[in-house]
Amino acid sequence: MAKLIIAKNLTLAYEDKPIINKVNFTINTGDFVFITGKSGSGKTTLLKSFYGELKPIGGSLMVGGFALEAIKRKQLSHLRKHLGVVFQDFKLIPEWNILKNVMLPILIAGQDRKTSEHKAREMLRKVNLLGLEHKYPSQLSGGEQQRAAIARATIHQPILILADEPISGLDEYSAEIVMNLFEKANKAGITIVIASHSIPHNFSQKYRHFHINEGKIHELS
Ligand SMILES: Nc1ncnc2c1ncn2[C@@H]1O[C@H](COP(=O)(O)OP(=O)(O)O)[C@@H](O)[C@H]1O
Ligand SMILES: [Mg+2]
């Protein structure tokens, strides 16, 4: 099993105050991992480090073969082309319709407009949003926006999807659709890491579970 993320004595901090303190773990290609922990424990911080938003202050963090403690800007943008993120602060762009939002990653990757549009429609069909492609994010429900965000995070077939609290605030119906989308992506070979205050009950036995407590990460089984 290929190793996709390797953390060795990883320490993450804001202004020298450690949030994640000398932790070790490995995530393999194809894994589906839940990261839990109480509010403020460091779930978002950890996901941000995987995306290269927050540099480790100690130890090492390898993601997709890149050492993030020493990565250059150019390498980071290269890595990010292979990542998909569903983060609170990477929301859909309000001035763009859903179709354009979903097209963005493949336009960035250099695909022409026509191909991008075709692929975006295909993706919107998969997340059951076809017919809403000309609406703006504010015209969609929370669950629909989250599905659009997942379509955008998946369209370029990333190696890894990072999702921060993707189902909190959604009703049970939307949460189930969203979780099914992650499962499908995972079956297609994409590694999934989800930060969530809790794990939906029907998922608890199936996947890996990291729990953050007082700066340490314990894998529960
Ligand atoms: N940009 C920041 N600057 C300083 N402290 C921060 C920053 N972001 C988060 N923190 C602090 O780091 C800790 C972990 O935050 P976070 O990773 O957002 O937790 P979680 O996602 O588990 O709720 C919290 O104590 C929070 O206040
Ligand atoms: Mg958080």
Image: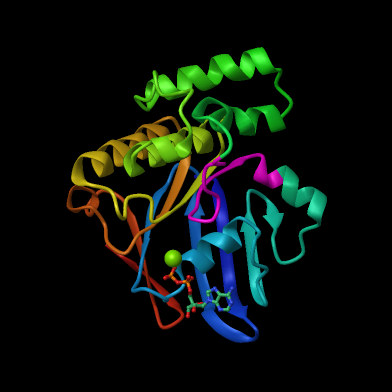
Write the residue at 41% across / 83% down: 214
Q: Position of residue 115 (x, y in %)?
A: 63, 14
Residue 54 forms part of the magenta stretch: no
Q: Nearer the viewer, residue 194 or 140?
A: 140
Write the residue at 38% across / 25% down: 129
Our reading of the magenta stretch's main secondary structure is loop
Q: Nearer the viewer, residue 22 or 19?
A: 19
Query: In the orientation shown, which residue stands out farthest toward the bottom?
Result: 17
Write the residue at 51% across / 75% down: 23
- Compared across the picture, whether 61 is left or right of 199 comes to right
Q: Nearer the viewer, residue 196 or 27?
A: 196
Q: Position of residue 140 (x, y in %)?
A: 38, 36
Relative vertical location of residue 69 with respect to residue 92 in this rendering, above or below: below
- Compared across the picture, whether 199 is left or right of 16 comes to left
Residue range in magenta is 79-94
Residue 83 forms part of the magenta stretch: yes
Q: Nearer the viewer, residue 174 or 132?
A: 132
Relative vertical location of residue 48 with respect to residue 117 in this rendering, above or below: below
Write the residue at 35% across / 44% down: 142
Q: Position of residue 186 (x, y in %)?
A: 40, 37
Q: Position of residue 126 (x, y in %)?
A: 39, 23
